[in-house]
Image (tube, helix red, strand yellow):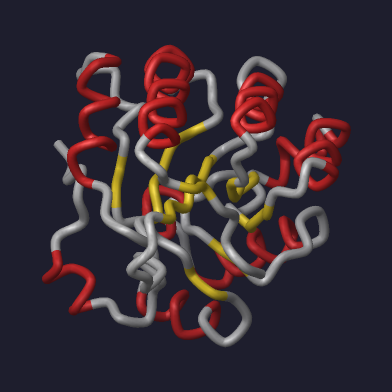
C-alpha cells in the first residue's frame, strides 16, 4: 500500500525535505532510484535522449562501482545525479552512525549535494546530520513501478492523474521495477510532451 500522491499533511509535517519544485509552468522532474544497472538504465537514457528530456538519477554507490561506464553516461547525457546510499539501506532499520558512514561511502562515488533515502526512510537523528550537507529530495508523485501488485497500466495512471506543475516523479531504473517502468515511462514522455510539459533535472 502506498500513496501515489504524497499527502499534503506529510509535506507539512516534514518541511525539511524537498517534495516538489514551486512553479506555475508545466515542468516535471523525473527521478530514477536504485541504478545504474545494465538491464534498465541504458534503456532509460536512450528514451530520455529521444524525447529531449532531462532527469535525476539517485544512484546506489555499489551499482556505480559495478557499472562506472553507465554512471559516466548519465553525466555525459546532461542528467543530474544524487546519493542513494552505498548499499540501499533502510534508515529506520540502521543505526545512525552506520547509516551516515554508508552515505559517505556513496559520496566517494557520487559527488552531489542531492540525497534521497531508500524507502523514504530516515530517523530524525539521520535527518539532522544529512540536511546540513545535502538537499534531501523526496517526491510528489510515486509511480509505484516497484510494486508487483499493481499493473503497468496502474503505474502509468498513478503518474498521469497526480502530476502538477513542479512535481517530482519517482520511477526506478531497477530489475524489480523494469516491467512496469518500461510500459509507463514512454507513455508519460509521449503524452505529456504532446501536452506541452517539459522534463528537467533537479538543480545541484
Q: Nearer the viewer, residue 34 or 184?
A: 184
Q: Residue at x 29, y 48 (%)?
A: 141
**Which part of the image, by quadrant, shows the C terminus?**
bottom right
Please determine whether, in this image, residue 41 is positioned above or below residue 92. Answer: above
Q: Residue 126: give x, y in percent of width and height.
A: 47, 75
Q: Nearer the viewer, residue 190 or 140?
A: 190
Taking 168 as reference, is 58 left or right?
right
Q: Residue at x 54, y 77 (%)?
A: 130
Please determine whether, in this image, residue 2 is positioned above or below residue 110. Answer: above
Quarter residue 71 falls in:
top right
Is residue 51 something one can see in this rendering?
Answer: yes
Q: Residue at x 55, y 30 (%)?
A: 173
Q: Residue at x 86, y 36 (%)?
A: 68
Please determine whether, in this image, residue 164 is positioned above or below residue 128. Answer: above
Taking 172 as reference, is 87 left or right?
right
Q: Residue 59: give x, y in percent of width and height.
A: 64, 46
Taking 39 as reference, is 64 left or right?
right
Is residue 92 something one can see in this rendering?
Answer: no
Q: Residue 30: give x, y in percent of width and height.
A: 48, 46
Taking 146 as reference, is 85 left or right?
right
Q: Residue 111: give x, y in percent of width and height.
A: 78, 63
**Which part of the image, by quadrant, shows the N terminus?**
top left
Amino acid at each position: 500500500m502506498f500513496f501515489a500522491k504524497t499527502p499534503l499533511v506529510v509535506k507539512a509535517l516534514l518541511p525539511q525535505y524537498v517534495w516538489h519544485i514551486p512553479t506555475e509552468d508545466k515542468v516535471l522532474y523525473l527521478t530514477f532510484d536504485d541504478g545504474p544497472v545494465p538491464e534498465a538504465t541504458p534503456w532509460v537514457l536512450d528514451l530520455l535522449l529521444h524525447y529531449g528530456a532531462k532527469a535525476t538519477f539517485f544512484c546506489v554507490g555499489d551499482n556505480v562501482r559495478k557499472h562506472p561506464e553507465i554512471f559516466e553516461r548519465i553525466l555525459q547525457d546532461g542528467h543530474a545525479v544524487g546519493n542513494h546510499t552505498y548499499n540501499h539501506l533502510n534508515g529506520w532499520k540502521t543505526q545512525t552512525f552506520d547509516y551516515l558512514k554508508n552515505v559517505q561511502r556513496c559520496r566517494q562515488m557520487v559527488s552531489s549535494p542531492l540525497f534521497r533515502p531508500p524507502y523514504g526512510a530516515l530517523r530524525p537523528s539521520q535527518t539532522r546530520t544529512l540536511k546540513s550537507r545535502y538537499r534531501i529530495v523526496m517526491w510528489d508523485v510515486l509511480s509505484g513501478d516497484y510494486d508487483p501488485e499493481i499493473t503497468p497500466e496502474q503505474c502509468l495512471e498513478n503518474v498521469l492523474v497526480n502530476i502538477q506543475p513542479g512535481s517530482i516523479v519517482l520511477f526506478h531504473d531497477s530489475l524489480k521495477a523494469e516491467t512496469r517502468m518500461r510500459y509507463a515511462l514512454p507513455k508519460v514522455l509521449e503524452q505529456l510532451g504532446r501536452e506541452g510539459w517539459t522534463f528537467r533535472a533537479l538543480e545541484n
